[in-house]
Amino acid sequence: MKFFIDTADLAQIKEAQDLGVLDGVTTNPSLMAKVGIQGKEAVMKHYVDICNISTGDVSAEVISTDYEGIIREGEELAKLHKQIVVKVPMIKDGIRAIKYFSSKGIRTNCTLVFSAGQALLAAKAGATYVSPFIGRLDDVSVDGLNLIEEIRVIYDNYGFRTQILAASVRHPMHIIECAKIGADVATCPLSAITALLKHPLTDNGLAQFLVDAKKFA
Ligand code: G3P
């Protein structure tokens, strides 16, 4: 399973990249706003900065919601850097735009996916990635991981090549369950990735090894 980091924070992206396990980055308008990026020029520069830190795919989201606007924005974003994947919302004009981008060889990430039917449409339109938001489903008492399972079955039934990118991941158990189900990618906050490192028996074991090592040093 690929690990993407879900942030626009350059320091966090660098930290994950330096760990050596990062396969890409996802952003969205809320994450860009969170790091204080404002105005088109600053946003475009920030995407390039992210591409220069990460070696993997970088999802950059369009703001337009009409077909022509999505195409215009997506083409502009795609031209910024070869690592850019155009993130398009799961709406009617978004699906049409994904079909267009797919015919032009522009890679896409269909975002704000909350049902298996939406994921099926995204795959049929030729999306490179589909982003089911598992944490936000959990927030409303719907099992987000169950959606990943449903999409896995559907995509495997028909050999769809669209990659399942589990999004809105909140904690390490989400990551582990996604890996068990067979999600292609999990995009996670840095805290969830680094939480995978932790185990008290590792800490205790290492402390004891270091104590014992002093006995023969
Ligand atoms: O990738 C989508 C993600 O950023 C949404 O996460 O935590 O805002 O639900 P969250």
Image: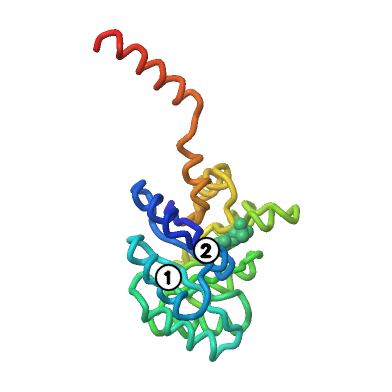
Residue at position x 53%, y 78% in the image = 62
* Residue drawn where x is 34% and y is 49% of the image: 18
Residue ID for mark 2: 35
Q: Under 8 Å from ligand 1: the CB of mark 2?
A: no
Residue 61 vs 186, above or below: the answer is below
Pointer 1 residue: 46
- Crowd class of label 1 (few under 14; some 14 to 19; many from 20; radius 10 Å): some
Labels 1 and 2 touching (C-beta < 8 A): yes
Q: How far from the left and from the top, in percent, is residue 177?
A: 56, 45
Name the secondary structure under disc 1.
helix
Find residue 93 and report its horizontal and vertical position in percent. Answer: 59, 84
The amino acid on which the numbered mark 2 sits, given as a three-letter code, is: Val
Q: Does residue 127 appear to the left or right of 50 in the view shown? A: right
Q: Nearer the viewer, residue 7 or 170?
A: 7
Instruction: State ligand 1's quadrant.
Output: bottom right
* Any part of residue 71 in sight: yes
Q: Quadrant of the C terminus?
A: top left
Q: Residue 26: percent from the left, percent from the top?
A: 48, 63
Mark 2 element type: loop
